[in-house]
Image (tube, rainbow, N blue to C red):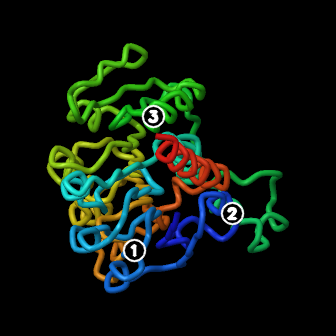
Amino acid sequence: MRMVILDRKTLGNDVNVDIFNKFGEVEVFDITKENETKDRVKDADIVITNKVMISKEVMENSKLKLICISATGKNNVDLEYAKQKGIEVKNVAGYSSSSVSQVAFSMIFHFVSKLNYYKNYVDEGNWQKSEIFTHIDKPFFELDKKRVGVIGLGDIGSSFAKRAQAFDCEVVYYSTSGRNNNSEFKRVELDELLSTCDIISIHCPLNEQTKDLLNYENMKNMKDGSILLNLGRGGIINEADLSKLIDEKEIYCGIDVVNVEPIEESNPLLKVQNKDRLLLTPHIGWASVEARTRLISMVADNIEEYLAK
């Protein structure tokens, strides 16, 4: 059995992938460019990919039996052609709920607690010059009783919602599919969620229903001082609209995903003037050490399940 890992670097060098050696010969590539994929895959029985595209052209002259996606989304594989060719495709889900929720709350605390301001105040030598024991010129707030809106109440959204509930927040959600009727939290329409919530966190997939779900027209109704987070997928928020709104209205945004990754120099979010209102991170929400370790283990489980047939 011959296996190829196409983008090892995306899994992080601090986690071990030796578990795959038990399945046979393993060839590992840190990065695979589009023009290299076909050649690297053609003699493999199993391929592991995170973001490398596995197109019809890649599969048609290969001897592939199994494609393992080391992620939840399947949009980097031509699923229809894989089915025609009898190639099984397996993804993983549920491995990163705690990691994404934790990063989301890190973003919330970044905006709510103003710790960067107070750290800089001390680091710049201001505290020892103070006439009083404290310095509270930058107001900060408690999370208690704040209204938190979750867009997409799947595994990750539910994990985030329960953590918000633990901070004594009122949690509501909007179902992007229209089919989620979770009895634990109140379901509301998108316009109500945007206009009434103090904190809004996006955890839904990107599809035809959610492309540009948040745009200038509906985001302009957000409360002054509210916090908007996107740890779902780039493209759910219209980035040009958001960048314009941040400079017009006092909203605070934690953005972990963008429409094209890595972020392009032309991305309007990089041109925002009020940079204190925007926290951009390079798609790290999923990537705690524990989450990536679980991910690798779950990919190995998928391979074992396939081989046991």
Q: Which residue is mark 1?
A: 41
Q: Which residue is mark 3?
A: 155
Q: For the point 68% across and 63% down, which residue is it?
A: 18
- N-term mark: 3 or 2: 2
Identified by mark 1, the residue type is Val
* 162 or 227, nearer to the observer: 162
Residue furthest out toward the top: 183
Q: Which residue is mark 2?
A: 18
Where residue 178 appears, as percent x and y from the top left, is: 20, 28
Q: For the point 31% across and 55% down, which residue is it?
A: 87
Left or right relative to 95: residue 60 = left
Q: Quadrant of residue 188?
A: top left
* 306 or 137, nearer to the observer: 306
* 162 or 80, nearer to the observer: 80
- N-term mark: 1 or 2: 2
Mark toward the viewer: 3 or 2: 2
Label 1, residues with CA under 10 Å away: few <14, some 14-19, many ≥20: many
